[in-house]
Image: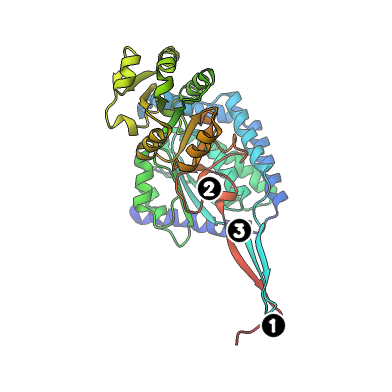
Amino acid sequence: MTSASLPAASLHDHCRGMASRARRAAIDLADAVGEQKAACLRAAAARIRRDVAEILAANALDVANAPSFGLTPAQVDRLLLDEKRVEGIAAGVEAVAAQPDPVGEVLGEETRPNGLVVRKVRVPLGVVFFVYESRPNVTADAAAVALASGNAIILRGGKEAAHSSRQIVESIRTAIAESGLPVDAVQLVDVTDRQAVGEFLSMDDLIDIAIPRGGEALIRRVCSEARMPVLKHFTGNCHVYIDKAADLDMAEMITVNAKCHRMGVCNAAESLLVHRDVAAAFLPRIATALAARGVELVGDEATRELVSGAGTATEADWATEYLGPKISVAVVESLDAAIDHINRFGSRHTDAIVTADPEAARRFASRVDTACVMTNASTRFNDGGELGLGAEIGISTDKLHARGPCGTRELTTYKYIVTGTGHIRS
């Protein structure tokens, strides 16, 4: 890292220099063919594997500093790397390399009556400013997704993972340079001054999109300051609804996985809804299963009657993303009541139904306002790698441009390419 603080004018010039280099790299990268980009990413994966000792040494410094940043155990888990996780990072980069190149795809073509040929062609967005917290694997995922889709990216990682992110970026940039692509297609912000984020967010003449990934406060700051479009989600208040036609063994398995597989991530379940017809059979058993894993239950009156020891859910609980060992539980009168509850309190991220009734599944999927609906599957599957994107740069709950996990295709737009033979308009 450069000095933690620079004079305002110097900071502005420093950030603008990075953004200008990213803009030039994006122009150079825009016409790189798919195999060039894929080969570069495969080389980056190989370099990450080769540099595993350096990456783990850098990560050890971050983990040692974690107490001074006040990180929770869940946040430290997200920060921590070992050889298996580094291999997962490299494999994730390779998975992105294996994706079809979206750039150049013809989305539509028409020959007009006057002979003009009009094509609608997929192209990169340009320059991405990516702000994120405490996740060294995200550094590689974001760089890979951006590069594969022909975009330059400026990475601003959290101070909690500064050493890990710097070493991963060095490995990737080495591979880019050796591959002959513009090395400034991937840059890591090298000043810790928080004002640097504001500087980049003001540069809508050089940066095409901002993507924040982290806590709600960070995302809201980016949304309030950005002069360019922002791709984001605020929270992940994900629901699992157990329908009256659910297989209760399946329901228990899915609920436990959705809540407990990893509690500190945005696609973990935070709310459980149970149809009244199966509540007496299901709630005591799921309460036992969750309690065995240290999860606290807070619920409505019907839940507390069936589960001794359950706390009282407040109005705020229904909308809370706990990111830890707590879940809100409600008994609902009907499928439509469950849908209404989710649409009122949910965050439009990921919501699941467990049911053997195809019509209930169809109605749930149609009426729940969410980026990703799971039928008889854990909410944890809302992930770019799991859904076949290779990796993701984030999950969007927006409805314009991109929704759900965002991979290479979601970092593209389109342009019209019109070809004539000396046509003039009369």
Residue 171 in the image, given as x and y percentages of width and height? 60, 39
What kind of colouring is applied to the model shown? rainbow
Q: Quadrant of residue 264?
A: top left
What kind of residue is marked 2? Gln
Give the quadrant of the N terminus: top left
Q: Which mark is residue 397?
A: none
Per the image, the residue denoted by label 3 is: 123
Per the image, the residue denoted by label 2 is: 187
- Horizontal placement of 58 versus 217: left or right? right
Q: Can residue 170 be seen in this view?
A: yes
Distance of label 1 from label 3 (alpha carbons): 26 Å
Distance of label 2 from label 1 (alpha carbons): 43 Å
- Horizontal placement of 26 versus 215: left or right? right
Asked if labels 3 and 1 touch by Cβ distance under 8 angstroms, the answer is no
Asked if labels 2 and 3 touch by Cβ distance under 8 angstroms, the answer is no
Q: Residue 422 carries which label?
A: 1
Residue found farthest to the bottom: 426
What kind of residue is marked 3? Val
**Tag 3's secondary structure?**
strand
Q: Can residue 61 be seen in this view?
A: no
Residue 14 in the image, given as x and y percentages of width and height? 44, 54
What kind of residue is marked 1? Gly
Numbered circles on residues, count: 3
Residue 36 in the image, given as x and y percentages of width and height? 71, 50
**Comparing marks 2 and 1, which lies closer to the viewer?**
1
Q: In which quarter of the image is residue 293?
A: top left
- Horizontal placement of 341 versus 393: left or right? left
Q: Which of 73 and 57 is in front in this view?
A: 73
Q: Which of pointers 1 and 3 lies earlier in the amino acid sequence? A: 3
Mark 2 Cα shell of 10 Å, populated few (<14), some (14-19), many (≥20): many
Asked if labels 1 and 2 touch by Cβ distance under 8 angstroms, the answer is no
